[in-house]
Image: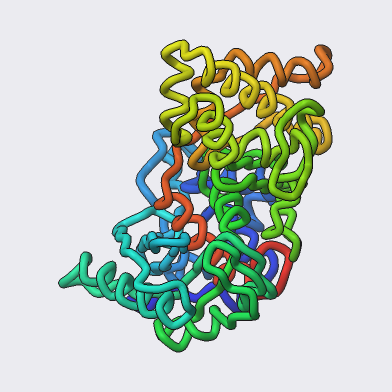
């Protein structure tokens, strides 16, 4: 079966298809209500989408229509299109193969043979071949690919800086991957890609305003306002990393006292614990020691927990959002230092303000790779990524 195209669709038909993709399956009455359409208008718009196979009628909801017949929700055929998503770290690549609704059907990872662009492209090409082989003998139709990494990306095509890969010069990674994979490829900052996935298909689906925070080697921040991801060429700079949190805290590598990097990054906390304990202590070991009541690690972790609470409060206060997703290699801090986190959050949050809902996610690079796939999905169904035209 040839996959039904999303373009060219009229504005109204495109809105119907997009709402079913993001929220479906949906009864016609609910779909009409969401899009402020009459029943007749929805029927007229849905017919060509059903005839083309882009939409289908799924199983009965059990709810009866006015005519007394059970309604049949509209849905998409998600597996007519497949998308590659990949997250590149400084040492490996995590890749997934997803449906049009970002459902993961295959996954794989591989060590990077090198950090130069040619080695990265070669590793991705081999991973994609392995993902397709996992579904043999059925060969999936791959519509597009998305790749994310920690760094700055211009026009979803060119990496202008990736410190973890030691890329200082522009790298046309989108074009290199398009040639290597034989399908359109887009590139995204990893935190923005993760935010897109949470926005369309994740825990924040249905919320028109929310934030994503990550703590680990660095501090990451993504924001959705008015149901759109806030995108910027500066997204990969890590601007939130130097937000001041503790005037008496340690110095970060750039000389800022008590900023988010100094208080929350895994390297900073591990270094502080190593000095206090006079031996090398990693981040997770520091959290373990704090949990067992260690007199050195305990106060350090609690101070970091309070700083995290203050950072969450700052994001909620400045963006007027109450829905925040926290993830990253350092997200376990929220569990170990939970009382201190709540103390810091309450300290900077007006008691009259709404409660902040914090969804803590253990780090999973497969989810980050899925985010890159969602960037590719958005490129295909919108003709752009977020608010910008696709390359």
Question: Residue 391, position in %: x, y?
Answer: 64, 80
Q: Is residue 239 above or below residue 137?
A: above
Q: Is residue 314 left or right of residue 211?
A: right
Q: Is residue 288 above or below residue 206?
A: above
Residue 338 occupies quadrant: top right
Residue, x 44% and y 64% (percent of image)? 85
Name the quarter where the N terminus is drawn: bottom left
Q: Number of numbered discs present? A: 0
Residue, x 36% and y 63% (percent of image)? 97
The extreme left residue here reads 137
Question: Residue 288, position in %: x, y?
Answer: 41, 23
Question: Residue 224, position in %: x, y?
Answer: 71, 47
Q: Is residue 70 above or below residue 131?
A: above
The extreme bottom residue here reads 179
Residue, x 54% and y 62% (percent of image)? 164
Residue, x 51% and y 77% (percent of image)? 185
Q: Is residue 123 left or right of residue 6?
A: left
Can the viewer see residue 379 in this picture?
A: yes
Nearest to the observer: residue 162 or residue 301:
301
Residue 363 occupies quadrant: top left
Nearest to the observer: residue 136 or residue 370:
370
Nearest to the observer: residue 27 or residue 306:
306
Nearest to the observer: residue 206 or residue 192:
192
Can the viewer see residue 43 in this picture?
A: no
Colour convention of the picture = rainbow
Question: Residue 299, position in %: x, y?
Answer: 59, 17
Q: Is residue 343 left or right of residue 179?
A: right
The extreme front residue here reads 278
């Amino acid at each position: 079966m040839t996959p039904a195209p999303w373009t060219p669709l009229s504005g109204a038909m495109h809105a119907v298809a997009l709402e079913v993709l993001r929220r479906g399956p949906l009864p016609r009455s609910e779909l009409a209500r969401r899009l402020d359409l009459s029943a007749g208008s929805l029927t007229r718009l849905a017919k060509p989408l059903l005839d083309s196979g882009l939409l289908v009628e799924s199983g009965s909801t059990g709810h009866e229509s006015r005519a007394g017949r059970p309604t049949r929700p509209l849905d998409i055929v998600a597996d007519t299109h497949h998308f590659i998503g990949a997250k590149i770290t400084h040492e490996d690549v995590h890749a997934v193969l997803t449906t049009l609704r970002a459902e993961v059907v295959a996954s794989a990872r591989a060590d990077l043979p090198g950090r130069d662009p040619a080695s990265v492209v070669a590793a991705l090409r081999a991973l994609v071949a392995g993902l397709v082989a996992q579904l043999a003998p059925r060969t999936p139709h791959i519509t597009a690919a998305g790749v994310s990494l920690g760094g700055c990306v211009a026009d979803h095509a060119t990496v202008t800086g990736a410190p973890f890969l030691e890329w200082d010069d522009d790298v046309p990674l989108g074009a290199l991957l398009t040639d290597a994979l034989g399908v359109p490829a887009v590139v995204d900052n990893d935190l923005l890609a993760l935010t897109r996935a949470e926005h369309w298909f994740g825990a924040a689906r249905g919320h028109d305003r929310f934030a994503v925070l990550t703590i680990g080697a660095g501090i990451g921040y993504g924001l959705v306002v008015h149901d759109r991801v806030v995108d910027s060429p500066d997204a990969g700079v890590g601007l939130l990393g130097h937000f001041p949190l503790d005037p008496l805290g340690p110095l970060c590598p750039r000389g800022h006292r008590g900023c988010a990097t100094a208080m929350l990054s895994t390297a900073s906390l591990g270094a502080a614990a190593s000095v206090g304990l006079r031996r090398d202590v990693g981040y997770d070991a520091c959290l373990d020691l704090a949990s067992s009541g260690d007199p050195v690690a305990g106060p350090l972790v609690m101070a970091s927990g309070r700083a995290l609470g203050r950072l969450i409060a700052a994001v909620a206060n400045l963006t007027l959002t109450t829905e925040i997703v926290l993830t990253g290699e350092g997200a376990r801090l929220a569990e170990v230092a939970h009382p201190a986190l709540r103390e810091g959050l309450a300290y900077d949050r007006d008691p009259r303000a709404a409660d902040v809902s914090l969804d803590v996610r253990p780090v999973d690079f497969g989810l980050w790779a899925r985010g890159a796939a969602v960037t590719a999905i958005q490129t295909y169904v919108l003709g752009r990524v977020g608010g910008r035209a696709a390359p």
